[in-house]
Amino acid sequence: MVSRAAAAIRTRPRRERESEVLVWPDLVFIEFISAVLFSIALLVLSAMVNAPLLNRADPDTTPNPSKAPWYFLNLQELLLHMEPAWAGVIVPTIALVLIAAIPYWDRDTDGQGVWFGTKFAGRLAVFGFTASVMVTSLLIIYDGSLHVIWTENIIRGTGLNSDFQWPGGLDWFRNLRGLDTGIPWESIGFTIGGFTMFEDWRAIPLGIPGTTTDPWLLNLNFPSFLSQQLVPVATMVGLPVLFVLFCKMLGWVHTRRDIALLIFSAFIGVYLTTTIVGTAFRGQGQDLKPPWDIVVLEE
Amino acid sequence: MAEIERAPRKSLNEQLYDLLFKNYVWQSIFRTGYPNTPRNQMLAVATNVFLHLHPTRIHRTHVKITHTYCLGGLSFFMFLGLTVTGVLLMFYYVPSIERAYQDIQELETNVRFGQLLRNMHRWMAHAMIILVLLHMMRVFYTGAYKPPREFNWVVGVVLFILTLLLSFTGYLLPWDQLAFWAITVGTTMVGSAPVLGDESKFLLLGGFSVGPNALIRFYTLHVIGLPLVISIFMAVHFWRVRRDGGLARPL
Ligand code: HEM
C-alpha cells in the first residue's frame, strides 16, 4: 500500500528541464505587468465612479426594494420562489458542499491541466450553461406570472376579446403559489377504508397524538408545502438529472468528468441568471421590471 | 616603456549606476545586482522572501497568459491592495453608529484623496469576488482539481466563502441606508435556517436587529478576524500548489 503522499509524487510528471522556463524573468514579469494593468484600471475606475453613499441608516424608513449586496442577490432571488430556509441556507450550503466534493467524486486524471481537455468538454459546457440560462429564465418568468400578463395582453391586443382574463381553470398555472391558492383543496378528498383523506389539506396530522407538543410536527399545510418546498426542490434536483439524461442520449456523457462539466456549467448559468435578475430586474415589491423602470422608494 | 594597464574610464551612465546601486546602503538591502544569469535568477527567486512562494522554474505552458489568466495571482493582488487601502481607511473611520456615517462623509469631502481611497477599496472588493469566481471557473475547466489537488480545491472553496464574508462584513460599515438594509436582508436569510437560525443571527448581530453591536462585530470581523483567517488559508493554498507539484498539467 503506497501512501497518498507517495502516490501524489509518483503521479507527478517527470521533470523535463528543456520544457521549463525560469520564474525570473518569465513569470515575475507577467505577474508584474498584470498587477500594474489592474492597478491602473482600478485607479481609472475609482477616479470616474464614486462608491455609493446614501442617506444615513434609518431603521424606520425601509427602502423598497431592499436588496442584499449583489453577490447574495442570487439567494435573495431564490427566496422569492421557495421557503426561506431552503433558499437562504439549505440550498447554498448543499451547493457549496457539492462543489467542494467534486474532486472526491470525479477522480480520473483525464484531460487534466488543459482547457476543456476531454472530448465533449466544450459542448457540455456550452450546452449546460445555455440551457440552464434559458430554463432559469423561463422558471422566473413563470413564477413572476409574466406568461399570464403576456397572454392577456396579446389576446386583448388582437381585438378578439378586449377584456380577456386568464381562465380561472388555469389559476393553478399562474405561478408557483397557484398550486396553493389556485386549486380547490377543500373539495379534494378520497376515502380509504372508511377514512376520508384528507378532510383538511392545510392541517394534515403528522404526529402521533399525545407524543409531541411541537405544533409544527403535528400538522402539515400540504398546499403550501407543495408549492414552497416540494416543487422547487424537485425542480432543483430533477432538472440536473434531466440534463444528464439528455446529454447521455446525445452520447456526450461517458465519464464523471462529463457529468461534472455539465452540472457545473449549468450551475454557473443559474448563478449568473439569478444574480442578474436579482440585481437588475427586481423593482418594488420584488416585482419583475425592466432595469430602466426600477426606482427605490423609501417607505 | 612599460605601458600601465589601466581600467577604461567609466561612462557617466556607469558612474551613476554605481552610485545608485553599488553603494553601501543599497547593497545592505539587495545583496546582489540584477540577476542576469540563470543561476542568479533562480537564486533571486529562491532567496527572496516574497518571491520564494514561487518555484524557481515552471513548465513552459504555465506562463502562457491563457492558461491561468493570472486569476489566482490577481485575486491575491486584490487582497493585498484591499489591505493597504483598508489600513488607510482605518485612520479615518470609527465604528460607532454616532460617527461611522459622518466619518465616511468627511473622508469623502475633507480628506485629500479620501474619496479616491474609498472608491479603490470598494471597487477592489467587487473585483476580488469576480476574480475569485473566475479563478474557480478556470481551475474547474482546466480539470486542475483532480488528484492530487483535491484538497486544494476544498481550500479554494473556503477561500471563496471567506471572500464573500469579508465583503459582506465591510458592506455595513458606511452605515448608510444601503448598508443597513442590505445587512438586514442578509442576516434575515441567516435567521431562516432550520436549525440554530435565530441563534446564529443573534450571534452575528449581537441582538435581534442591526444596531451598534452589529456594527462593532462586523467591524472587528472585517478588519482583523476574517483577514487573519483568510491569510492562513491563502498560505495553505499557495503552499499546496507547490506541494502538489506546481500547476496541473496533462500526465
Ligand atoms: C482568495 C481566493 C483565492 C486566491 C488568492 C487563490 C490563489 C491561487 C493562485 C495564485 C494559484 C496559482 C495558479 C493561478 O493563478 O491560477 C491558485 C491555484 C489553484 N486554486 Fe486558487 N485562489 C483562490 C481561490 C480559489 C478557489 C475559490 C478555488 C476553487 C474552488 C481554488 C482552487 C485552486 C486550485 C485547485 C489551484 C491549483 C490549480 C492548478 O494546479 O492548475 N482557488 N490559486
Image (tube, coloured by chain):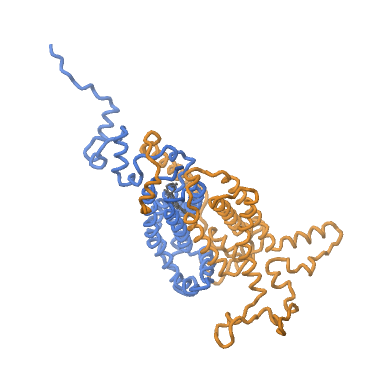
Q: Judge by depth and name the residue closer to the eye, B46 or A281.
A: B46
| Residue at position x 60%, y 62% in the image | A237
How many callouts does the rendering have? 0
Q: Looking at the picture, how far across and down is residue A120, in whole percent?
A: 58, 45
Chain B as rendered: colour: blue
| Residue at position x 43%, y 71% in the image | B213
Relative vertical location of residue B225 with respect to residue B128 in this rendering, above or below: below
Q: Judge by depth and name the residue closer to the eye, A266 or A29.
A: A266
Q: Where's the C terminus of chain B, which quadrant?
A: top left
**Which residue of the protein is positioned furthest toward the right in this rendering?**
A160
Q: Judge by depth and name the residue closer to the eye, B82 or A256.
A: A256
Relative vertical location of residue A24 with respect to residue B163 in this rendering, above or below: above
| Residue at position x 57%, y 68% in the image | A86
| Residue at position x 31%, y 32% in the image | B37
Relative vertical location of residue A147 with respect to residue A12 in this rendering, above or below: below
Image quarter of residue A76: bottom right
B201 lies left or right of B16:
right
B62 lies left or right of B56:
right
Q: Looking at the picture, how far across and down is residue B102, in whole percent?
A: 45, 63
B90 lies left or right of A87:
left
**Which residue of the protein is positioned furthest toward the left in this rendering?**
B1
Q: Judge by depth and name the residue closer to the eye, A121 or B120.
A: A121
Q: Looking at the picture, how far across and down is residue A19, in whole percent?
A: 40, 35
Q: Looking at the picture, how far across and down is residue A241, in whole percent?
A: 61, 58
**Which residue of the protein is positioned furthest toward the front in this rendering?**
A1
Instruction: Tell me if residue A54 can be seen.
Output: no
B250 lies left or right of A195:
left
Chain A as rendered: colour: orange
